[in-house]
Amino acid sequence: MDKMLYTAATGAARVMEAQAIRANNLANADTTGFKADLERVHAMSVAATGNSLQTRVLAQTQSSGFSQQSGALNPTGRTLDLAINDAGLFAVMTEDGEGYTRSGAITPDANGQLTLDGRPVAGVDGPIVLPEYRELFVGDDGRLSIVADANGIIEEIGQLKLVNPEMSTLNKGLDGLLYAADRQPLPASDTVTVSSGFLEASNVQAVGELIAAMDLSRQFEIQVKLMKSAEDLAKSGNSLLKNA
């Protein structure tokens, strides 16, 4: 009975882990540039003890990375709302090193420094600080230019660092950002282009995630029923021993 109970309990724990991944995806269905997490189940054989045969297999949830599918581009009309065309990532500076994201909702802080979700945006030559300006332009290569005064002279103030690594080489951190496996900064790419006035939506397929969550709920119910059956069998066995 103990083996049956342990198998059912570990199965229920695996389902709860998978549910957490699905719930996190659903919670970020409206998060700009969010990449849906994937989950993979790995079958692990349980080592046999004594003269028993190695017949038991337990399921273990493992991270399978994230969906690399691009989200839809939604127009906003705001100059510093940027969306990457096709492949590529924006770079931001974090305490854990340089992180990368598809979210392009850039805002200047009180000092004019460009930030993404409170983190400094990385430029090709370092952080970018906006001076006072009358007009702001963002080129498709990530170059930022301003018209500072009534003279109409256009001045370039910096260029966003855009990278284009193989997505399979990146790991997703707990903060939702993507990082290189060795946490070293990636080189800038001149092949990445951006569109101003757009934001990329999350690539979470809400309906698919909801259906998967419902299926996992049914699996959890089955595991709980198995645990209840194991308990009932144990009670029956103890009763027989008492009456023997």
Image (spheres, helix red, strand yellow):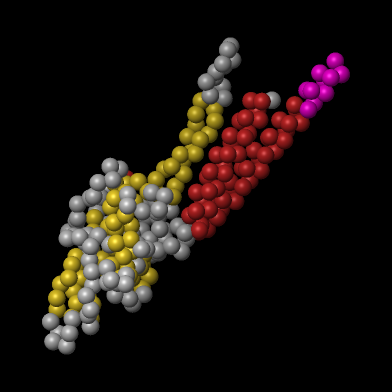
221 inside magenta stretch: no
Say which quadrant the C terminus sits in. top right
Q: Could you say which is closer to the camera, residue 49 or residue 57? A: 49
Which contiguous range is marked in magenta? 235-244
Q: Residue at x 15, y 72 (%)?
A: 156
Say which quadrant the N terminus sits in. top right
Q: Could you say which is closer to the camera, residue 166 or residue 94? A: 94
Name of the residue lying farthest toward the top:
51
Q: Hey, which quadrant is residue 131 in on the image?
A: bottom left
Q: How many marks?
A: 0
Q: Percent position (x, y) of residue 163?
A: 24, 55
- The secondary structure that most of the magenta stretch takes on is helix
Name of the residue lying farthest toward the right:
243
Q: Is residue 79 left or right of residue 190?
A: right
Residue 138 visible in rendering: no
Q: Residue at x 20, y 60 (%)?
A: 126
Q: Is residue 104 above or below residue 216?
A: below
Q: Is residue 83 left or right of residue 210?
A: left
Q: Could you say which is closer to the camera, residue 220 or residue 156? A: 156
Q: Is residue 39 left or right of residue 238?
A: left
Q: Is residue 104 left or right of residue 59?
A: left
Q: Could you say which is closer to the camera, residue 186 or residue 22? A: 186
Name of the residue lying farthest toward the front:
111
Q: Is residue 209 above or below residue 158?
A: above
Q: Residue at x 75, y 26 (%)?
A: 234
Residue 52 visible in rendering: yes
Q: Residue at x 71, y 30 (%)?
A: 230
Q: Percent position (x, y) of residue 198?
A: 33, 70
Q: Hey, which quadrant is residue 226 in on the image?
A: top right
Q: Percent position (x, y) of residue 205?
A: 47, 57
